[in-house]
Structures are given as C-alpha cells and as structure tokens.
Image: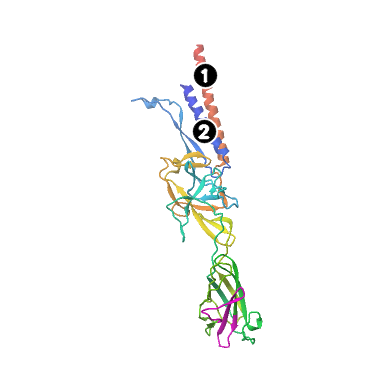
Amino acid sequence: MPFRIALSGLNAAQTDLSVTGNNIANASTAGFKGARTEFSDVYAVAFEGISSLATGNGVAVTGITQNFSQGNIDFTERNLDLAVSGQGFFVVNDASGQSFTRAGAFNVDRSGYIVNQGSQRLQAFPAITGGGFNTGVLSDVQLSTSDGPPQATTTITATLNLSSSDSVPTTVPFDPADPTSFNNSTSTVTYDSLGSPHTSTLYYVKSAVANQWDTYQYVDGNVVASGGASPVSITFNSDGTLSGPSSIAYDAVPSGTGALPIQMDVNYSNTTQFGSSFAVNGLSQDGFSTGRLSGIDIDDEGVIFARFTNGQSSALGKVALAGFPNVGGLRQQGNTAWAQSFESGDLILGEANTASFGLIQSGALEASNIDIAASLVNLITAQRNFQANAQVISAADTVTQTIINI
C-alpha cells in the first residue's frame, strides 16, 4: 500500500512540476495565462466503512485551472498590436472555426486581411454606410488596396475680418491683376468630381456704400458669377457683425478635366467687419482628391480606421470582443488561444468599453500574467514534494526487505 500511495504522490508532484515549468517557459508569451495544479486526497471507503480508521490511498490531480487575471500592458508603438485592458477576448477565425485569444500581435497578410501569427483573421463588426456598425454580424477585416475616391468641393467656409478702417480703392474697375483695385484676397485649393485641384481665389473690394463689400470669386483665374452676376455684395451691421447674405451660391463652371462642372457655395456666416486689420481666421473647404492607404489607426473602443494620403479616413469595422459566463471552462488550443466548451457557457459578443468589456489599447500587447518569483517558489515546492514521495518509496522498500529477511 505505501508504494501505491507514494506513487500517486510522485505522479501528482510530476504534474505540478510540468504545470509550473510550463508557466515559467511562457513567462514572455504575450497574452499567456498561467495555470495551477489542484489536488485532492483519495480514500477507499466501502459501504458502511469506518472512515475514522481509513488511512487514505494517496493523492489525485483534480484539475489544472487557469488564472485569467490581467497581465501588464507593454507598449510596442505598432498600430496593429492590440491589448485588452479589462475583460474580453479577441475573436479570430480560420477554416477550423472561431478561436478566442488575448494575444493581440496582428499583421496584414498578402490579401490585406488583419491576421495573427497563425494566419487566423481578426473578427470585427462591419461598418454601415452612413455611420455605425452592424453588431449582429462578424466579418474579416480587410484593408482596401484601391485609391480612396475623391469628393468634389461644394462649400468654402471663410471666417474673415474685413477691416472697417480700409479705404475704398481708387482704381476702378476691379482687375484681379491690379492689387490697387481691391482691398484683400485669399485663396484655397478646391477639387472637382475627379479629384483634380483648382485654385479658388476670393477678392474683397470695399464699397462706397457704408458697411458694404463687393466680393468676387475666381477659379483658375476665371471669374465665377452668382446668378449670372459678379460681384456679389455682403453687408455688415454697425456693430461689425454680418448682416447678409451668410452664404453665396456661385454658378457652375466647366472643370476642364472631364469632371462634372464645379459648383460651390461660399459661407460667410462667421465673417466680421471690425476696426482691426484684415485677417483670415479660417478658410476651409469640404472637397478632397484621391488618396492611397497610408496607415491604420485603432481607437480605445476598437474602431479600425484606414488613413489615406489625402487626409481622409474611413471606418473599416469595430473589433469584436468575446466573453463567457465561465472563462475557466474554456478549452485550450495552444498558440495562446481558447475554444468555447460546454463548461464555458454561451458566447457573448460585445464592443469595447461597453457592459463588462474592457478597453482596447492600440500599439501595445498584454504580457503574460506569470509571476516569475512565485513560480520559482512553486517549482522548489513541487521538487521537494517529489523528493519526499520518493523517500516514502525508499522507506517502504526497506520495511519490506526487513520483513522478507525475517
């Protein structure tokens, strides 16, 4: 009997050594979660047996449980390195089905899909045209390799101060080539429907009428009328605020590039006429040219943005996070991944920073949650347990040999 008891102790200590050794081996594995060995004593008690006289039959390994506590967040400065701060798993997919992982070292494969080192594709909620995400569907995240489409300019927003101290120009009529025929001018680049740039210049001439200015617009050096008329006058109140009009709709003009005719409005709603000098406080337009993919950004809620060289960005999707009623019941698959099991409960999908799900940190990885010092102490303890059980076998052998010698 002592031999079997000690043998069960040796097996249990060996298992503990293996688990502890595996923890130490993966101390630098991103997203790794440590495990511990759990034991229970063994008693062979028959029906109506007297348990107070039972000596016990050794030890058994009842389970190897995982510790899903948070690991440290290590910053890597790679946009596609992701870490979950809080609860939740990344969802990845391949031909064998879905897996769940805390290791967020992702890359882009030759087809433009965001994948991990096992070529499993990151799953996200797809973006909806017009804004938002379809949280009822999971899809692969694929980066677009085509040029981003252009957008024609429809509105120029001019935030100016036209100086009330300026004098009426003495040179008439207005001539854009003669600076003495106007008071001020400003320019911006606008775009047609094909994304070709066009220089739009705005000229301002103080009128002899009090608090009135004549405005002109030229596109690529050609005058643009409004309702067939040029110039268009804007007026101000005695306190310097704009009286009207707040916006001027200019007539369409040919682009000269085969694109649709250029037609835009100029918004003057925030323009003033104060005594200070002429100032361009803001000049923006809503068009842009074509652009190529220049990078990827992921915010703390998991929204994946594609950045283009034209300064625009578009949402490709929102990283999905997975949760389970019992994470300890997940089945290990290797490669720092887990699979759903009956013990884990039903899969719960959600978004970062909602319900019980944590935040997503881009440019960072979650380190292993292994405490090296504690693991080394556990290793020594398991080693001593193994030696002690081996000593029991040696002692039992000596007793048996003594009995045989009688």
Q: Quadrant of residue 184?
A: bottom right
Q: Is residue 178 above or below residue 332?
A: below
Total marks in image: 2
Q: Is residue 144 above or below residue 172?
A: above
Q: Is residue 205 magenta?
A: yes
Lower sequence index among marks 2 and 1:
2
Mark carried by residue 397:
1
Residue 181 visible in this rendered orientation of the protein:
yes
* Lateral position of residue 348 relative to residue 223, left or right: left
Q: Secondary structure at mark 2?
A: helix
Q: Quadrant of residue 272?
A: bottom right
What's the amino acid at mark 1?
Answer: Asp
Q: Give x and y (percent) for residue 223.
A: 59, 77
Q: Which residues are magenta?
A: 204-231
Q: Give x and y (percent) for residue 313.
A: 54, 60
Please identify the residue farthest to the left as the structure is shown: 48
Viewer-closest of 286 and 161: 286
Mark carried by residue 151:
none
Q: Which quadrant, please, contains the N terminus?
A: top left
Viewer-closest of 155 and 65: 155
Q: Give x and y (percent) for residue 221.
A: 62, 75
Q: Which residue is mark 2?
A: 16
Q: Is residue 268 above or below residue 323?
A: below
Q: Secondary structure at mark 1?
A: helix
Q: Which residue is found at the position 49% from the left and 25% from the top?
A: 7
Label 2 – label 1 distance at C-alpha: 25 Å
What's the amino acid at mark 2?
Answer: Asp
Tell me whether the residue at label 2 lies in contact with that at label 1, contact meaning CB atoms closer than 8 angstroms: no
Q: Is residue 299 magenta?
A: no
